[in-house]
Every structure is written in structure tokens, then in C-alpha cells.
Image (spheres, rainbow, N blue to C red):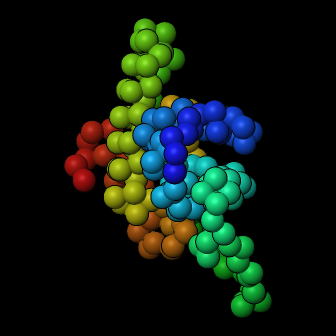
Amino acid sequence: MQSLEVGAWLEGLGLGQYQALFSDQAIDSDVLPDLTDDDLARLGVPLGHRKKLLRAIDDLLGREATEKHAPVKFARTRTDAERRQLTVLICDMVESTDLASKLDPEELRRVMGVYLDACVNAVTSLGGFIARYTGDGIVAYFGYPAALEDAAERAVRAGLALSGLYQI
């Protein structure tokens, strides 16, 4: 694939809000073809935008939609609903607004990238799922997409790891 300015490409797709995220995660034209739906989900990109991005990547590369990107037909196999316990962990950086006013934007982006990477590592190492990025933080689920009997304990351990009181 020839060199591509990913930020401009995202803008052209109407998805310019992901420019900083892609930049923070070092997603450039060399990495773009390797992105999967799972990668984008872990970055907190909503389903509709993931599908749009994956189609655009396929178009950009001139390839047919791959099987993993192709629409899946779901058949309901159960007539009853499933009840599942879900634990939600919300984490954000304390005084990030104050920090933003003191740092150069490039330095702030670097600091936030390191911080968010640490959050993601703490959550995912304990079986959590990053549901969303919230600017200076994350929303994570424990017990989703797979049920975990100890989801609440895992969420507490992740929270303690994020506060520095627990080593993973």
C-alpha cells in the first residue's frame, strides 16, 4: 500500500474524531491493513464505525470483503433470555484539565497515550473489556463478552492496579 496520511483519510470518511486515537496508537498506513474488528473494538470504536472503517480499508486495498469482515447472519438458538452479572469499571485521570493547561499539546498527547495504555493493560490483563474511551479515561466491563464468576473481584483488582496499590 502506498503511503497514506491516515488523519486525512479518516476525515474523508467522516470519522475524523479518531485521528488522535490512531495517532496515539501509532496506527499509520503500514498498520492500517492489519487492523481487525477486534483491534478496533479494543480501541473503543463503536460497531457502526468499525464496520465503516473495515469496509474502507478493504476498498483502499482493492480487496474483497474478507470473511472476518463479512456480514454474519445470526440465528436465534435460544428462546429464553440470559441473565448475566456485569461489573463496570470507570477510570479517569485526576486533574487532567489542570494538566492540559500546563502541558504542550504534543506532550499532553504523549502523557495521555502512556496513561491510557497503562489503563488498558491493567484491565485486559485481568480479563476486562474496554467498552469506551472517555477522553481522559475508560469504561471497562468485567463479565462481558464472556461471563466471569469473579468479575467483580477482577474489576476491583484492576482498579487497585490503576491506583498503584496492587501489582498485576
- Spot the residue most to the left: 167
Residue 54 visible in this rendered orientation of the protein? no
Front residue of 153 and 15:
15
User: Is 86 positioned to the left or the right of 118 in the image?
Assistant: right
Left or right of 50: which side holds 88?
left
Instruction: Count the numbered circles shown.
Output: 0
Figure quadrant of residue 37: bottom right
The correct choice, above or below, for 31 with respect to 58 in the image is above
Q: State the residue at coordinates (72%, 91%).
A: 77
Q: What x and y, as percent, mark residue 11?
A: 69, 35
Q: Position of residue 10 (x, y in %)?
A: 65, 39
Q: Is residue 26 left or right of residue 70?
A: left
Which residue is at the front of the view, 162 or 57? 57
Pinpoint residue 6: horizontal percent, then vertical percent: 57, 38
Image: 97 above or below 71: above
Residue at 51 percent across and 73 percent down: it is 146
- Decide which of 104, 144 is in the foreground and name it: 104
Residue drawn at 45 percent across, 48 percent down: 30
Locate residue 107: give its quadrant. top left
